Image (tube, coloured by chain):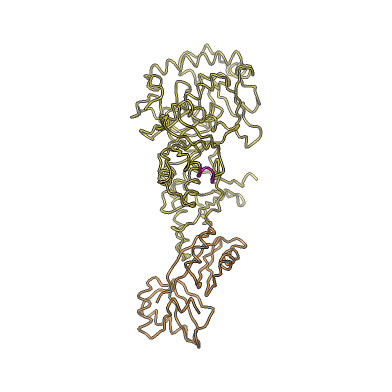
Amino acid sequence: MKVEQISIFIENKSGRLADVTQTLGDSGINIRALSLADTSDFGILRLIVDKSNQAEKTLKEHGFTVSKTEVIAVEVPDRPAGMASILKILDSGQVNVEYMYAFVERCGGNAVIIFRFDDPEAAIEVLTRNGVHVLEGKQVYNM
Amino acid sequence: MLWNDEFETLPREAIEALQLKRLQQTLARVCATVPFYKQHFANAGITPGMVRTLDDLRRLPFTLKQDMRDNYPYGLFAVPLDQIVRIHASSGTTGKPTVVGYTKRDIDNWAELMARSFVAAGATRGDVIHNAYGYGLFTGGLGAHYGAERLGASVIPMSGGNTQKQMMIMQDFGSSVITCTPSYSLYLAEALKESGIELSSLKLRIGILGAEPWSEEIRVEIERSLGIKAIDIYGLSEIMGPGVAIECIEAQHGLHIWEDHFIPEIIDPESGEVLQDGDRGELVITTITKEGIPLIRYRTRDITRIIAEPCICGRTHRRLERMSGRSDDMLIIRGVNVFPSQIESVLFSMDGVEPHYQLIVDREGTLDTLEVQVEVNEETFSDEIRKLQQLSQSISRSIKDLLGITCKVRLVEPKTIARSEGKAKRVIDRRQQ
C-alpha cells in the first residue's frame, strides 16, 4: 500500500531544479508527482517517478543528495469537501500528516493526494477502515 | 623505535648544555655575518656575550616574518651564496615570499631530523613512502623526500594533485606510508570511496600529515576512513621545513620538538612575555644549528603549549601540543576570539556531519556575521524541512555554547565546498574587502 518517494536536497541557487529534472529526463525517467518545499537557503524536491530505483541511482551518480521515503497515495473524491472528508478521518484517527501534495494525474473521476505520515501503518489502517481507497505503488508509478 | 638513540634520549641537562653552547655560537655568528642581527641586537642593547644561560634568551628581540620580507631575498643569510646549495620559499599569499637558503650541512641535518620523524611516526626502511607533499619551492616535498631516503625507505616522489593517479600508484606500488596535508588525506579517502577502491586493496598503514592545523576529531575521521594511524608533523620553511616536531606513534599525544636543533619558547602573543611550560600561547623558535639562515626567536604565529612531562616513548625532547591554530588565523568576531579549529571540533562532535565546512565572515552595518557552511549528506538529509532546520539549529546552538557567538548555519549540497589538494581554505573573511 506504500509508494516510494525520492527526495533531493537542492540549494537555493538558480538552475538546480533544472539540473535535477534534466538528469532524470536524460535517463528516460518520467515524473508522476512532485512537490517542492523551500526555505530561504535550500529546498527539498520530492518526487514520485515511474522508476524510482533508477532515479535514485542516476541522481546519486550526478552528485545529488537523495533519500527514499515511503508515502501513501490516497484517492480523494473530486467534489467540494472531498479533501476535508479525508482529513477528518485522519484527524479522528489521531494520525499526523507531515506534509502532503496533489498528484498531477487523475484516477478515474477522483483526484490523488500524496501523504507523508509520521505513522504510515496507523494511517493506512484508519483510512481503509473508513472506506478510503489507498492506491498500490504499482498503480501510481504507471498512471 | 628510535633513529638516533643517543641524541633522541639525551638527558635533560645534556640537552640544555648543548642548547646553550649552540645558542652562543649561533648568536656570535649572526652578529658577525648578518647586518640585520647586528643592528637588531644593538637596538635592544644586547650583545651575544650577555647571553650566559638559556634564560637569557628572553632578553633578545624577536624576529618577525616582516623582517624576512624587509630583507628579501637574501638579506638574512649568514653565509655567502656560494655555500648555499638549495633555496626554498614560502607561498607568499600577501606580497613577496619569504626566502630561505640551506648549506650542505643544513640539508644534511634536515634529512637527519626528517628520518628521526619518520621513525617516530612508526615508519621503517621497509616502507614504501608515498610523498604527496608538493615538490618545488614549498619545503614539504623535498624535505620529506630526503628524510625518507635517509631512512632507507622506498620513496615515491608523487607531489600533490592528480588524485586519480595517486590512487592508482597507491594500489599498484603498495604505498604503506603517505605524507600529505590532513585535508588532502580526507579528500583522498573520499575519492577512494567514490572509485569503489576497498581499503583492503591498499597497504596504507601510516599517514604523516601536516602543513595545516587540524583537530583530534579530524584525526579520528582520517584514521577511520583510511584505516591508518594518522601522525601529526610540524614544520615551517622559515625554521627548516617539515620535521621540526612530530608525534610519536607510541603516544600520539604532543609533538616532540628536536631540541638539539631548536629552542622552543611559548609567549603571550599580545605582550611578548615568555609563558611557563604548560601555558598556551604563541610558539617562538630559535634555530641553533642552522648555517644558511639562522633565526633568533622567530615568531611562528602558531598557538600551542609545551608538554614537559616525560613521554612513554623514551624520547627526552619536550612535546608541543597539537597546534590549535595560528595567532593570525584567529578571527575576532564581535570581539570574541575564534579559531576555525574550534568550530571544526563542534562539527565533528555531531553525528553524521561532514568534515567539509567553510566559514564566511562578513559585516552587516557594524555587526560581524558568521556563516558556517556545512555539506548535507545522506546521513543528515531528511525529506522533512523541519528535521533539516533542527540540524542547522543544533549546530548553531553547539557553537554558541562553546564559543559564545551566534552564527548562521547554511546547509549546502555535497561537494560544493572547494576541496583543496593542498592547504584547505576554511575561512572567507569578506570584512577586509
Which residue corresponds to the image point at 55% horizontal and 37% vertical from the top-left?
B159
Q: Between B9 and B93, which is closer to the camera in this rendering?
A: B9
Q: Where is residue B276 in the image (x, y as percent from the top left)?
A: 42, 27
Chain B drawn in what color? Answer: yellow
The reply to whether residue A35 is visible in this rendering is yes
Chain A drawn in what color? Answer: orange
Q: Where is residue B187 in the image (x, y as percent from the top left)?
A: 50, 46
Queried whether the magenta region covers residue B165, the answer comes back as yes
Judge whether B13 appears above or below B162 on screen.
above
Q: Where is residue B257 in the image (x, y as percent from the top left)?
A: 44, 27
In the picture, the quarter occupied by the C terminus of chain B is top right
Judge whether A103 appears above or below B10 on screen.
below
Which residue corresponds to the image point at 38% horizontal and 35% vertical from the top-left?
B252
**Range of magenta residues:** B163-168
In the picture, the quarter occupied by the N terminus of chain B is top left
Judge whether A53 appears above or below B143 on screen.
below
Queried whether the magenta region covers residue B43, the answer comes back as no
State the predominant SS element of the stretch in magenta. Answer: helix
Q: Position of residue B374 (x, y in %)?
A: 50, 53
The reply to whether residue B306 is visible in this rendering is no
> Which residue ends up furthest to the left in the rendered image?
B312
